[in-house]
Image (cartoon, grey):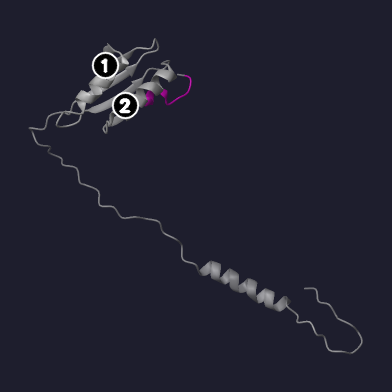
């Protein structure tokens, strides 16, 4: 540590030597940092237990699948439709007692513009059970 000797005229030094105070402050700061408990960010959630024996009268839920082809076609469960029919089919599916799941699968070279338009139609329709399927085909780039 560097310390100034002050003047050599015999008068008492008027400045306080703050170096030991800073040393003590740094030691205390390090001690406080070390003693801070580790923050835990876990949240306990009670997850439902799956039923190994589902009821026999359980009917498979209805699923509708929208496929977009590279040549600009919209397929609803394998049948070619236009955007107006798509809107009508989505509104009809919302009237069922149990809303059917809507699966969206554009093919590899399908138009991005058509995909965006169809997704906007789906969003505007108010469908709540929606999912993207077939994404595992594109897991590796270039296949």
Instruction: Magenta stretch: give its range.
Output: 135-142
User: Which disc is residue 120 wearing?
Assistant: none
Would residue 132 be visible to someone looking at this image? Answer: no
Tell me the residue that label 2 is attached to.
122
Image quarter where the N terminus lies is: bottom right
Which quadrant of the figure contains the C terminus?
A: top left
Q: Is residue 19 magenta?
A: no
Residue occupying the point 41% across, 59% down: 40
Q: Residue at x 51, y 69 (%)?
A: 35
Give coordinates of residue 29: x percent, y percent.
59, 70
Which residue is painted at 31% across and 26% down in the image? 122
Percent of width and height locating residue 57: 7, 32
| Front residue of 72 and 6 | 72
- Could you tell me which secondary element the residue under label 1 belongs to? helix
Quadrant in which residue 114 is drawn: top left
Residue 136 drawn in magenta = yes
**Left or right placement of residue 128 versus residue 141 in this view:** left
Q: Left or right: where does residue 30 sit relative to residue 17?
A: left
Residue denoted by label 1: 85
């Amino acid at each position: 540590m560097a310390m100034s000797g002050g003047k050599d005229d015999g008068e008492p030094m008027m400045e306080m030597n703050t170096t030991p105070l800073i040393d003590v402050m740094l030691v205390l700061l390090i001690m406080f940092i070390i003693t801070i408990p580790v923050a835990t960010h876990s949240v306990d959630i009670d997850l439902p237990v799956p039923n190994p024996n589902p009821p026999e009268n359980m009917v498979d839920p209805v699923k509708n699948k929208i496929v977009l082809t590279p040549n600009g076609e919209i397929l609803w469960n394998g049948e070619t439709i236009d955007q107006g029919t798509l809107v009508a089919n989505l509104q009809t599916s919302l009237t069922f007692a149990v809303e059917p799941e809507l699966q969206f699968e554009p093919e590899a070279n399908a138009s991005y513009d058509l995909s965006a338009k169809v997704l906007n139609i789906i969003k505007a329709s108010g469908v709540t059970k929606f999912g993207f399927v077939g994404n595992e085909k594109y897991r590796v780039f270039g296949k």
